[in-house]
Amino acid sequence: MTYEIIHVSSDDLVRSYVGKYKDFRLLSLQVAPESFASNYSTEAAFLDEVWYERLANPHAATYFALENSKIVGTVSMLGPLIYGPEDMSVLGNPWQAIGDKISNEQAICHYRMNGVFTDVRGQGVGKALIEAALKYAGGEAAVQGKAFVCSIVVESENSGARRLYERCGFVAMKEVPNGDTAVILMTTPG
């Protein structure tokens, strides 16, 4: 499989991909609802403006994996966060916890793996998306003269996702009750 990783970094790209992003996300919520904290009925009700704002948000870096111009995977890096990973709620909405006002020495980001289609899993797409997002966020932190920390929340029983994150340098920070149990993983890359 040949795929391309792109950073949706300009308004032209946001506008050209917003419909495809919405379609990808809604299909992902239908195909693998257990992989998401949200659900199809909630996000299907979003106005187009919400989808645009997610991609255009200055505190989010979104990447797509494209195969023949079709989105087959997405990831968003949100930050800086206004709190550290040790204070985060598993059920909290990281889209509401980002901003310019951070007082510590670290640039703290929260990584959201929005999904990779099942037919491309195991082919390096997820890892390539994670690495691109971490490289970008780490570079942004360096420009600000800050150390970089990134976190992600994964359900304990989602062993495939957890292994992927661990291969990308994430380590378990704490387990928290969330129905069953969720694990907050964190990394401080290079």
Image: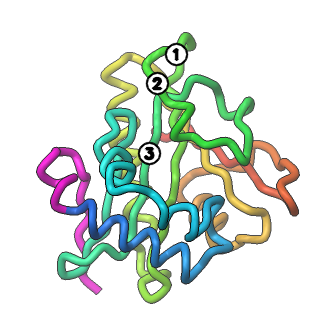
- Residue 85 part of the magenta segment: no
Q: Quadrant of the C terminus?
A: top left
Kind of residue at badge 3: Met
**Residue 122 spot, x, y in % from top left:** 49, 81
Q: Residue at x 16, y 61 (%)?
A: 16
- Nearer the N terminus, badge 2 or badge 3? 3
Q: Nearer the viewer, residue 4 or 43?
A: 43
Q: Quadrant of residue 120?
A: bottom left
Q: Nearer the viewer, residue 137 or 188?
A: 137
Kind of residue at badge 1: Ile
Q: Residues within 10 Å of mark 2 (few under 14, many from 20)?
A: some
Please give the range of residues in magenta.
1-16
Q: Quadrant of residue 58?
A: top left
Residue picked out by circle 2: 99
Callout 2 touching callout 3 (CB < 8 Å): no
Q: Is residue 133 placed above or below 105 in the rendered structure?
A: below
Residue picked out by circle 3: 77
Kindly state the secondary structure of the residue where label 2 is placed: loop
Q: Nearer the viewer, residue 51 or 82?
A: 51
Q: Residues within 10 Å of mark 1 (few under 14, many from 20)?
A: some
Residue picked out by circle 1: 102
Q: Residues within 10 Å of mark 3 (few under 14, many from 20)?
A: many
Q: Nearer the viewer, residue 144 or 167?
A: 144
Q: Residue at x 71, y 70 (%)?
A: 158
Which disc, if any, is residue 38?
Answer: none
Question: On the rendered structure, is 71 left or right of 15?
Answer: right
**Residue 171 spot, x, y in % from top left:** 68, 49
Q: Point out the frontmost of discs 2 and 3.
A: 2
Kind of residue at badge 2: Gly
Q: Residue at x 44, y 19 (%)?
A: 146
Callout 1 touching callout 2 (CB < 8 Å): yes
Compute the Cα span from label 3 to label 1.
Answer: 16 Å
